[in-house]
Image (cartoon, rainbow, N blue to C red):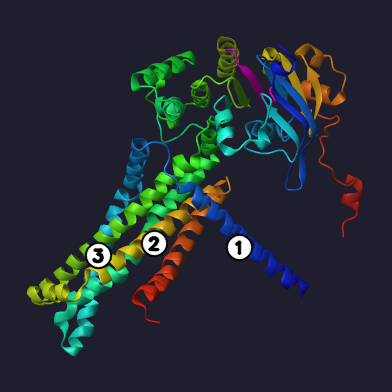
């Protein structure tokens, strides 16, 4: 009995410690660094690594998710005879849910794991220590640009995902299922609201971007400096990042739709 | 000059523990300005840890580490980073930034800490690379360098900001005789040319004794012998002797502590 209580206590302490450490870490990496041009260039370089190189997977996934949504939506909507509303359905599900959530999940798998592994390896080979000893704060020099790059990239990727999904849906609905093209777009235009759907979706993507990049960087920074440590850290990034996205998605949706 | 001003690094009764295990206890050491100091000791005595204590990456649990008269534990982050610009540490593996070319590695500190125009940075970097004989390798990436070359680039990089104190972590480990000779020469030459204070942490006795002015031998968390190379060679401390001449058995036992062999073999249950 005492053991159970002691273990629970120890667990709680560990969790508190983790929250404290990751919070402090976040405060330290939120900075920007000296000057304007040099940090900007670093952020742009990281946007290339994190964002641009994630484009292929986002493009392919976006188109296919859109096409599948059109197929599924058609089979349900047509049973009510309202298959003309398919444009609305595809656009709303993409903008509100699939765009931010699926791109965030892909982002964690593609960019988050890469970030963790890269930083873990920099730590293992003492590059971060070397930087620190040269009087340069690695948190500002290495981590901050990556955080900002992640925060900028994911909302753009999510937007692109939704956009391509809508075109993918249009292709299936109009060319394969024979929906009148005018009603696909007109239904969408009539029902999608800029603030309620587009902006709220973007807010989600922004929150996911922030949390996923934070998780990835934190695990890289705290990876044990062995090959096993890096593999554990990468796995932790993907698992915790994905769970965080799904959990936060529920919370954000509940808050923004205000169903309570 | 007073006695105080001639000392660069000072340790007073330094104690340090990691996971309940005491690495140092009551360590005293003072490293004089303008000399090459070698810190020798068997593997696992915490030589690298000692260098990290000097740089303030780790903080001693008891006692104090003074760098140029300043207690490193009491500096705030800004002052610590300022102090670090005056010293540099050469890592065992070189720790070059793998995403930058050799040139950019050496230019890194200059770009971060100075506002020199690009052509000046270029000249300085090429001069530094030339002094380690690798001007021709400026455009290579770290992955294309051999171990010895990487260490020389790292040396050029640590010299970029004209430090006053340079710490070498195992500079000779895993080097072939040629690059070992090159490194020994470079360390001595750089020391004289730039009027540095150099600290070498190593277990290569021969090389260390050949270039050092002052030697400390560490074992069991303490300094067990110190003085000039000649004094060290004549020491009659059995532990110092065992280490210097590489005897297999002695105060540092060949056997890891274990119960009696006969007893353990016969009492199988």
Frontmost of labels 2 and 3 is: 2
Residue A99 seen anywhere in this rendered image of the structure: no
Secondary structure beneath disc 3? Answer: helix
Query: At x 39% / y 61%, what residue is drawn?
Result: A207
User: Considering only vertical position in the picture, is B121 above or below A118?
Assistant: above
Q: Position of residue B98 (x, y in %)?
A: 44, 35
| Among the two numbered marks 1 and 3 on one chain, the one whose residue lies closer to the N terminus | 1
Residue B145 disc label: none
Residue A165 seen anywhere in this rendered image of the structure: yes
Magenta part of the chain: B195-205
| Magenta stretch: includes residue A143 | no
User: Considering only vertical position in the picture, is B263 above or below B65?
Assistant: below
| Magenta stretch: includes residue B204 | yes
| Quadrant of res B29 | top right
Report, in whole angstroms, how far the alpha carbon at label 2 lies from the one at label 3. Answer: 17 Å
Mark 1 Cα-neighbour bin, 10 Å: few <14, some 14–19, many ≥20: few
| Among the two numbered marks 2 and 3 on one chain, the one whose residue lies closer to the N terminus | 3
| Among the two numbered marks 1 and 2 on one chain, the one whose residue lies closer to the N terminus | 1
Chain name for mark 1: A
Q: Residue beneath label 1, please?
A: A15
Same subunit, labels 1 and 3: the answer reads yes
Mark 3 Cα-neighbour bin, 10 Å: few <14, some 14–19, many ≥20: many
Same subunit, labels 2 and 3: the answer reads yes
Q: Residue beneath label 2, please?
A: A207
In the picture provided, is B93 more to the left or to the right than B17?
A: left
């Amino acid at each position: 009995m005492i053991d159970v209580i002691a273990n629970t206590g120890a667990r709680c302490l560990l969790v508190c410690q983790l929250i404290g450490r990751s919070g402090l870490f976040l405060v330290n990496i939120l900075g920007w660094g000296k000057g304007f041009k040099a940090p900007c260039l670093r952020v742009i370089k990281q946007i290339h690594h994190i964002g641009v190189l994630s484009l292929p997977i986002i493009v392919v996934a976006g188109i296919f998710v859109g096409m599948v949504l059109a197929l599924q939506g058609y089979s349900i909507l047509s049973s009510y005879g309202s298959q003309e509303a398919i444009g609305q359905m595809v656009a709303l599900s993409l903008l509100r849910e699939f765009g931010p959530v699926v791109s965030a999940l892909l982002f964690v798998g593609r960019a988050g794991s890469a970030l963790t592994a890269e930083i873990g390896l920099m730590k293992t080979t003492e590059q971060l220590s070397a930087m620190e000893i040269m009087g340069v704060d690695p948190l500002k020099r290495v981590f901050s640009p990556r955080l900002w790059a992640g925060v900028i990239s994911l909302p753009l990727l999510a937007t692109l995902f939704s956009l391509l999904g809508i075109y993918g849906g249009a292709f299936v609905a109009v060319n394969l299922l024979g929906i009148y093209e005018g009603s696909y777009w007109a239904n969408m235009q009539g029902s999608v609201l800029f603030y309620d759907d587009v902006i709220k979706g973007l807010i989600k993507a922004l929150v996911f971007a922030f949390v996923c990049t934070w998780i990835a960087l934190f695990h890289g920074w705290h990876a044990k400096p062995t090959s096993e440590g890096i593999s554990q850290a990468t796995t932790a990034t993907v698992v915790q990042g994905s769970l965080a996205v799904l959990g936060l998605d529920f919370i954000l949706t509940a808050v923004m739709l205000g169903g309570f | 000059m007073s006695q105080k001003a001639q000392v660069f690094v000072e340790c007073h009764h330094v104690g340090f523990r990691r996971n309940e295990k005491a690495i140092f206890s009551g360590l005293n050491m003072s490293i004089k300005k303008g000399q090459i100091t070698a810190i020798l000791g068997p593997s696992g005595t915490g030589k690298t840890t000692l260098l990290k204590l000097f740089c303030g990456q780790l903080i001693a649990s008891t006692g104090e580490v003074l760098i140029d008269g300043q207690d490193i534990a009491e500096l705030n982050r800004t002052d610590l980073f300022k102090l670090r610009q005056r010293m540099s540490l050469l890592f065992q593996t070189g720790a070059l930034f793998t995403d930058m070319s050799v040139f950019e590695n050496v230019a890194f500190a200059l770009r971060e800490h100075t506002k020199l125009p690009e052509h000046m940075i270029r000249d300085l970097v090429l001069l530094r690379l030339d002094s380690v004989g690798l001007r021709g390798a400026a455009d290579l990436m770290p992955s294309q360098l051999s171990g010895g070359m990487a260490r020389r680039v790292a040396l050029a990089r640590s010299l970029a900001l004209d430090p006053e104190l340079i710490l070498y972590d195992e500079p000779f480990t895993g080097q072939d005789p040629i690059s070992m000779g090159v490194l020994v020469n470079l360390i001595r030459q750089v020391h004289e040319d730039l009027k540095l204070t150099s600290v070498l942490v190593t277990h290569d006795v021969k090389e260390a004794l050949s270039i050092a002015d002052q030697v400390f031998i560490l074992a069991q968390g303490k300094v067990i012998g110190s003085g000039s190379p000649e004094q060290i060679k004549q020491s009659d401390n059995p532990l110092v002797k065992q280490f210097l001449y590489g005897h297999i058995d002695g105060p540092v036992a060949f056997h890891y502590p274990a119960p009696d062999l006969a007893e353990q073999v016969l009492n199988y249950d």
